[in-house]
Image (cartoon, helix red, strand yellow):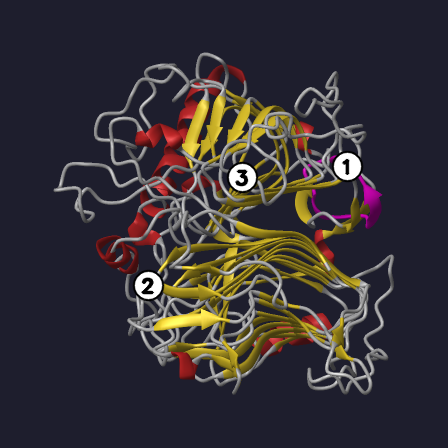
């Protein structure tokens, strides 16, 4: 994602300078396996020497040296125990927070056993860096209480362009790959607290105005950074606006995601450019940029609908009482506070399933909980102190680490075991094959999968009840046709030119046991030091599946070669399954159609896109010989029913000297009437609140959807303001 303003070339160079060289070690070291260490060896091109774990005595014998399992401090030694935990999380933050760790390896899982950590006098306060997962180990969030703060702030070296070696570069559009889940956070921090690593050259004291006060938890992030199943007793703020005071005012963030959470305070998007809140309670919400979506977000206690220009508010309870106040100066979209053109609300989420998660029972036994599928829901699922679902014994899981062979993994899956991938990079000489229904594949610490020979990294044969969560799929040196495939064969929808019949694919998932593709991320380039490619990142052939928080990214910066011919990828996400529901879908910079949706009766709730930065000329970027560019979201001609809500596509042509045009940001089916040149649109294909924003470069979108709306180009007055279509057709 880029900045809200025109991204300067200097800033572009800074974003490209963050990664370190990877996967070039000539030695390998011991790898942690279940029950202890085992020695392995591998070709020099495949494995880096494993760094010393920073978990120390908290390293898990079951899950390896990069999974820290903390026990709540108690008794006479409680103060010393809390300090020991503080030291470990600080040391991990020192390594994982800096921009130089953006393409680092491996990750960490910081797991907190049920109990209480910190106090009003000695809170536990720490930052969350790249590839870091923070989670409670209770059966519900209420079981694990942290008094303190769990924060993400913008970060960059003092030598960032424009800083002159002294200022603080406050940009969060590169804060990716970290998460927080399954805990109860009482937000607090002492006024003299000094963050580790340090935040600003001269940090204002906590409690100074509305900046670093003890009730604000900052999660200043962009895509791939979910907040799930938490209770926040305080304000959750998705942009660290405090960093702007007295410093460079270029702190941007983009694409936040929060789900199944209770926020006893304000959900403040601030300047985070877009985001989605799903099944989340909040006392109020605020934001002032482009596109915010609320799905199944309940009414806070005591809240009554607001008024609009003195008239009664909507009948449904709105969580955005700060947004719907009639003061927007933008007249062509949903009313919102100054600058907001799109606030989209769905009273209920049509179908959801929360993430599978590790927990410990009352005897300290490890288990994995699988939350139940829910339909037409509002609010989080744990407020009564219990949660519907199924508990699975840890013995039913095969625990793998990067030294485990794919054959071992596939044999375990074939005999009916589930799979846990511990932190690290998995170089795969063949696909991981999920061959049985109701299989769970759970990644810890953002486990990263890389194909070595042009193979897929994972293929899901079954299409009933498979749950995938918490993994990164990188493209490899040899082009893969697909990185993750769910469902064996695509629906018989034809080739996208209207000659398919959409009659199902044999991957006929059950509505009550859908496949779940959740917190899954794709990268084409960025992390590798050599050119990489994959034609399609995610191919979802599974009927009734749920896509929940997926970011597919053809990298625009990184440690290795970046460019039109260097990191190549046609399409981020292809959906052929029927009745697929997606939440929080972000797809960016692919070279052809960013998303192709050919399944019937699909629903997408929130979409974020940036068009590719770098087509060298118009001829290189044409959907057909007569259609300029590629739509950011393409619903194929065979589709008769589809609904999209709260969708944004952004124009950022900054890595090219060409003037580029896209005929339409979104393309929906049209059918030529027999004997006529006129065309009709299927009434069952609908879009609500779809927009574009021109940010940078020459050219832009000639229309928003199928010739309707716009244009939105570099010649428009106003610029960097959403141009939207409220309802289509």
In the rendering, at what x and y percent does residue 166 appear? 15, 37
- N-term-proximal mark, 1 vs 2: 1
The image quarter in which residue 600 lies: bottom right
Badge 1 marks a residue whose secondary structure is: loop
Which residue is more in the foreground, 313 or 379? 313
Please tell me whether mark 3 or mark 2 is closer to you in this view: 3
| Rendered position, 648 above or below 70 | below
Mark 1 or mark 3: which comes first in sequence? 3
Label 3: element kind? loop
Mark 3 and mark 2: span between their CA atoms? 27 Å
Give the camera-side residue of 11 and 623. 623
Which residue is the site of mark 1?
A: 381
Between tags 1 and 2, which lies in front? 2
- The residue labelled by disc 2 is 654
**Range of residues picked out in magenta:** 363-380
- Residue 130: image location, x then y, percent: 41, 49
406 sits to left or right of 368: left
Where is residue 588 drawn, in percent x and y? 49, 63
Residue receiving disc 3: 330
Q: Residue at x 71, y 34 (%)?
A: 140
Residue 585 point in image, percent of width and height: 60, 57
């Amino acid at each position: 994602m880029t900045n809200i303003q025109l991204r300067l070339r200097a800033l572009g160079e800074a974003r490209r300078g963050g990664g370190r060289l990877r996967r070039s070690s000539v030695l390998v070291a011991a790898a942690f396996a279940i029950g202890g260490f085992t020695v392995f060896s591998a070709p020099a091109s495949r494995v880096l020497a494993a760094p010393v774990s920073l978990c120390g005595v908290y390293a898990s014998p079951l899950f390896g040296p990069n999974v820290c399992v903390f026990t709540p401090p108690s008794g006479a030694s409680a103060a010393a125990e809390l300090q020991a935990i503080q030291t470990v999380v600080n040391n991990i933050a020192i390594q994982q927070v800096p921009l130089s760790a953006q393409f680092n390896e491996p990750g960490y899982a910081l797991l907190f056993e049920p109990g209480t950590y910190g106090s009003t006098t000695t809170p536990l306060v720490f930052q969350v860096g790249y590839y870091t997962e923070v989670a409670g180990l209770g059966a519900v969030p209420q079981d694990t209480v942290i008094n303190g703060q769990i924060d993400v702030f913008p970060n960059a070296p003092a030598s960032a362009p424009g800083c002159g070696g002294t200022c603080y570069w406050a940009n969060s559009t590169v804060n990716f790959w970290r998460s927080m889940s399954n805990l109860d956070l009482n937000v607090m921090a002492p006024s003299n607290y000094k963050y580790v690593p340090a935040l600003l050259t001269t940090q204002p004291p906590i409690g100074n105005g509305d900046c670093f006060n003890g009730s604000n938890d900052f999660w200043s992030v962009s895509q791939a950074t979910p907040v799930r199943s938490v209770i926040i007793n305080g304000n959750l703020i998705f942009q660290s606006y405090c960093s702007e005071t007295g410093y460079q005012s270029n702190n941007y963030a983009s694409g936040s995601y929060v789900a199944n959470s209770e926020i006893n305070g304000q959900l403040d998007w601030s300047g985070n450019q877009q985001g989605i809140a799903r099944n989340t309670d909040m006392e109020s919400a605020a934001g002032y940029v482009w596109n915010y979506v609320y799905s199944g977000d309940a009414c806070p206690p005591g809240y009554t609908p607001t008024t609009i220009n003195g008239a009664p508010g909507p009948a449904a309870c709105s969580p955005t009482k700060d947004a719907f106040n009639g003061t927007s100066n933008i007249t062509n979209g949903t009313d919102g506070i100054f600058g907001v053109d799109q606030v989209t609300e769905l009273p209920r989420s049509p179908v959801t399933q929360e993430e599978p998660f590790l927990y410990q029972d009352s005897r300290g036994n490890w288990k994995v909980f699988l939350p139940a599928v829910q339909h037409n829901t509002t609010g989080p699922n744990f407020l009564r102190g219990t949660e519907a679902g199924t508990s699975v014994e840890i013995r039913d899981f095969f625990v793998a680490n990067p030294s485990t062979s794919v054959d071992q993994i596939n044999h375990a899956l074939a005999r009916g075991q589930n799979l846990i991938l511990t932190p690290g990079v998995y170089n795969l000489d063949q696909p991981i094959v999920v061959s049985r229904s109701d299989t769970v594949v759970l990644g810890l610490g953002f486990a990263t999968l890389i194909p070595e020979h042009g193979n897929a990294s994972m293929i899901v044969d079954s299409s009933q009840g498979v749950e995938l969560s918490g993994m990164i799929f990188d493209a490899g040196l040899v082009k893969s046709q697909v990185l993750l495939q769910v469902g064996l064969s695509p629906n018989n929808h034809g080739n996208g030119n209207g000659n398919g019949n959409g009659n199902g694919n044999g991957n006929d998932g059950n509505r009550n046991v859908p496949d779940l593709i959740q917190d899954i991320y794709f990268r084409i380039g960025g992390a590798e030091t050599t050119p990489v490619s994959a034609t399609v990142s995610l191919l979802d052939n599974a009927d009734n599946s749920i896509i929940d928080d997926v970011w597919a990214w053809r990298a625009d910066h990184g440690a290795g070669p970046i460019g039109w011919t260097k990191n190549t990828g046609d399409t981020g996400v292809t959906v052929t399954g029927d009745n697929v529901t997606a939440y929080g879908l972000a797809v960016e910079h692919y070279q052809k159609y960013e998303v192709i949706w050919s399944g019937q009766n699909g629903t997408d709730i929130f979409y974020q896109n940036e068009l590719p930065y770098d087509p060298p000329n118009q001829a290189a970027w044409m959907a057909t010989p007569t259609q300029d560019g590629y739509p950011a979201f393409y619903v194929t001609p065979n589709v008769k029913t589809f609904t999209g809500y709260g969708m944004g596509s952004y124009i950022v042509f900054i890595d090219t000297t060409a003037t580029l045009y896209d005929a339409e940001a979104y393309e929906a089916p049209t059918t030529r009437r027999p004997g006529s040149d006129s065309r009709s649109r299927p009434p069952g294909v609908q879009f609500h609140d779809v927009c574009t924003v021109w940010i940078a470069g020459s050219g832009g979108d000639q229309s928003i959807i199928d010739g309707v709306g716009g244009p939105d180009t570099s010649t428009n007055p106003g610029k960097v303001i959403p141009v939207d279509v409220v309802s289509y057709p």
